[in-house]
Image (cartoon, rainbow, N blue to C red):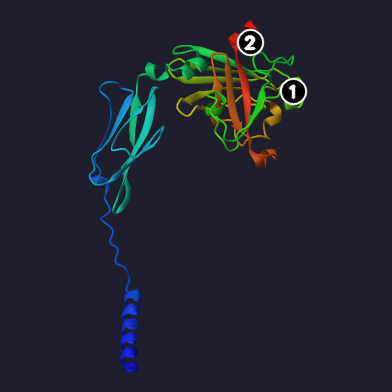
Amino acid sequence: MKNRFKILYTLLGLTLLFSACTPDNYELGALLSKSDLNFTIEPSSANPNDIVLTSLTPNVTPLWTTPFGRSIKVVDTINVAFPGDYTFKYGVESAGGYVQADSVQVSINTLDQNAVSGDMWTNISGGYGKEKTWYLDLDANGVSKIWAGPIYFYGTNDSWLSVTDGVAVGGDSWNWSPDWSGNQWLCAATDFGSMTFNLKDGPYVQVDHTSTPDGITMGGQQSGTYMLDTKNHTITLNDVTLIHPINYHTTLTKSWTGKFKIMALTADKMMIGVLRDPVISGQGACIQTLNFVSKAYYDSH
């Protein structure tokens, strides 16, 4: 009887060993080619600034890359508010893997006034066809007109949601709003220059840096574009640098251009948050805000 069990166990062991050594057979589907991709990218009949993306390739997940982010919707509409040439890309993920079509250039010839008529666009620029100038809220006499001082400090989790809307966000959320007169180590009192935002045929910005004798160290006169993300409350600066005190020029952040948080924005007040880089600054990460006042308010108070 024992011999029979030994033989049975031996056969079972060989069966298990054989099955363990037999490779699994996974078979991918065929990889699509560019010619298999079918899609359309065209303006809406209702609004030429609304670009309608339609994936017509069956049994795949579309992967759109647009100037304003990515989408996996079969049909999606992207609003392009300003004139210019924009690049769109269409790809799909199928059983055989990912494949992408050639990029598509879309030319926009009109400005969508409705898309830039919200409060944020109006507050920062004065509205369509207008321009508006802003100063860092500290002049050469050490006077701040609308804020307690030109620089505040917040936690890294803070944003428009906690600062403007007053919602408790949790995590690293705190605030210190120092007055300049009692904390003059923040920066020297000087004429920092100005930033002028307009909506004249597009979102253009001019920055005049005048806080150094040569006028060049901080960037001199710069012209570029800006873009507001009104949903996430951010501003992106292109080809210009944000007005800032010279003592933070190389000791706070890697770049003074690009995307920044807008913590608050009204007709006369603007607070832009810059993430303090712990490596560059030698201090812990936080959001250090630059507090601006409109020229109209500055001149009248």
Q: Position of residue 245 (x, y in %)?
A: 68, 25
**What residue do we see at 34% from left, 40% from top?**
72
Q: Position of residue 194 (x, y in %)?
A: 61, 17
In this rendering, the count of numbered labels is 2
Quarter of the rendering occupied by the C terminus: top right
> Which residue position is annotated with label 2?
298
Quarter of the rendering occupied by the N terminus: bottom left
In the picture, residue 61 is in which quadrant?
top left
- Left or right of 41, for residue 263: right
Q: Please name the amino acid that badge 1 sits on.
A: Ala
Q: Is residue 239 visible?
A: no
- Left or right of 79, for residue 289: right
- Left or right of 218, for residue 92: left
Q: Which mark is residue 239?
A: none
**What residue do we see at 76% from left, 19% from top?**
181
> Which residue position is annotated with label 1?
188
Q: Position of residue 282 (x, y in %)?
A: 70, 40
Local secondary structure at mark 2: helix
**What residue do we see at 42% from left, 18% from top?**
116
Question: Given the current orientation, which residue lies at the most extreme front position?
Answer: 1
Residue toward you, 252 or 152: 152
